[in-house]
Amino acid sequence: MHAVRFHEHGDLEVLQYEEAPQPKIEANEVLVKVKACALNHLDLWLRRGVSDWKLPLPHIVGSDVSGEVAAVGASVRRVKAGERVLLCPGISCGQCEMCFKGLDSACRSYTVLGVFVDGGYAEYVKAPEVNVIPIPGGLSFDEAAAVPLVFLTAWHMLFTRAQLKPGEDVLVIGAGSGVGSAAIQIAKAVGARVIATAGADWKLEKAKALGADEAINHTRQSISGEVKCWTSKRGVDVIVEHVGAAVWEECSNSLATYGRLVTCGVTSGGEVKLNLQGLFGRQRSILGSFMGGKAELLEALEFITRGKVRAVIDSVFPLQEAAAAQRKMESREFFGKILLHP
Ligand SMILES: [Zn+2]
């Protein structure tokens, strides 16, 4: 099959479009012919190399896949060849305490499709049957690939971690990112008020079109200043954040008493200063969040099929042009998901 692999870590030029062996399935696994694969920032981290993580090389990234079932293992019963499916990106053991609790991403053997196992920058990918979800409703392959990782992440951040309630005020950092565009919609759909940030005016317009009540251009406006103005100095109840160091102080200054800041990424760096006095005095919480459980993805998909929220697609590239697609992601000149078509 054709795939985009890297044999060493590095810049965009390490991505090679080449022949690779087709994955061989075990009895409990499903082979999927990839129709669409969405990019995530994770792909860029993995390509550059993450200290502590020793990836098998050559490696194929890609965590968000939709496609058609090409073959099933001997013990697979629920899905059949030809079925339109999407893949839940989180792979866990399915038989530990955390898995039983639905907290898959806290499983000690948890990994993500495209991290320690080959992912979807390829014509074929394999996954355990338990990760294979029939595409619901009338979702297209592109929409189905644009959903899993970011909706799962945003759902877990807002509900499981931050315990968002109707009527609360939510600040979403980075409206144009996959997680940002999902979080804006989910928070609005459950009756929150949403203020979103982005670095370009065209992105602010798109954030408002998705339902954001207010939008801040962080290149020329103070986030905390605008938040205080918008909330009559009270601050927001929940902050959804994945940028890290560059926005940390502004986020800290935007949080209401009893506010919850939930973070799922450090694209601008992970070292920050913490004022403990503000934390305990105003009874705030800082929460980490990583992926989510399969049940949460099913809940999010139900929301999507009911038309409450939708996948946001920026652009589509042929698989051969994976490097150009990743360059676009690095440039930040996008809003929503960038997809690859094998
Ligand atoms: Zn487990």
Image: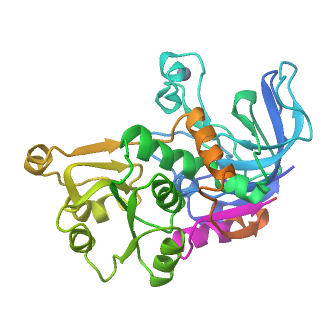
Q: Is residue 340 left or right of residue 24?
A: left
> What is the magenta range?
323-341
Res 233 visible: yes
List x then y, in percent, for residue 184: 47, 61
- Would residue 273 be counted in the magenta stretch? no
What is the image's colouring? rainbow
Residue 127 appears at what percent x and percent y? 73, 34
User: For residue 17, which quarter of the picture?
Assistant: bottom right
Judged left or right of residue 32, residue 191 is left
Q: Decide if residue 7 is in sight here.
A: no
Q: Position of residue 109 (x, y in %)?
A: 54, 25
Up/down of 324 relative to 35, above or below: below
Name the side, left or right, on which 325 lies relative to 342.
left
In front: 7, or 320? 320
Quarter of the image where the C terminus is located: bottom right
Figure disc tally: 0
Choose between 215 and 335: the one closer to the eye. Answer: 215
Residue 34: % across, % down: 81, 50
Relative to 288, is 23 on the left or the right? right
Residue furthest right in the image: 82
Which residue shows up at 68% across the image and 60% down it? 15
Residue at 55 percent across and 52 percent down: it is 150
Q: Quadrant of ligand 1?
A: top right
Q: Residue at x 58, y 48 (%)?
A: 149
Q: Is residue 338 magenta?
A: yes
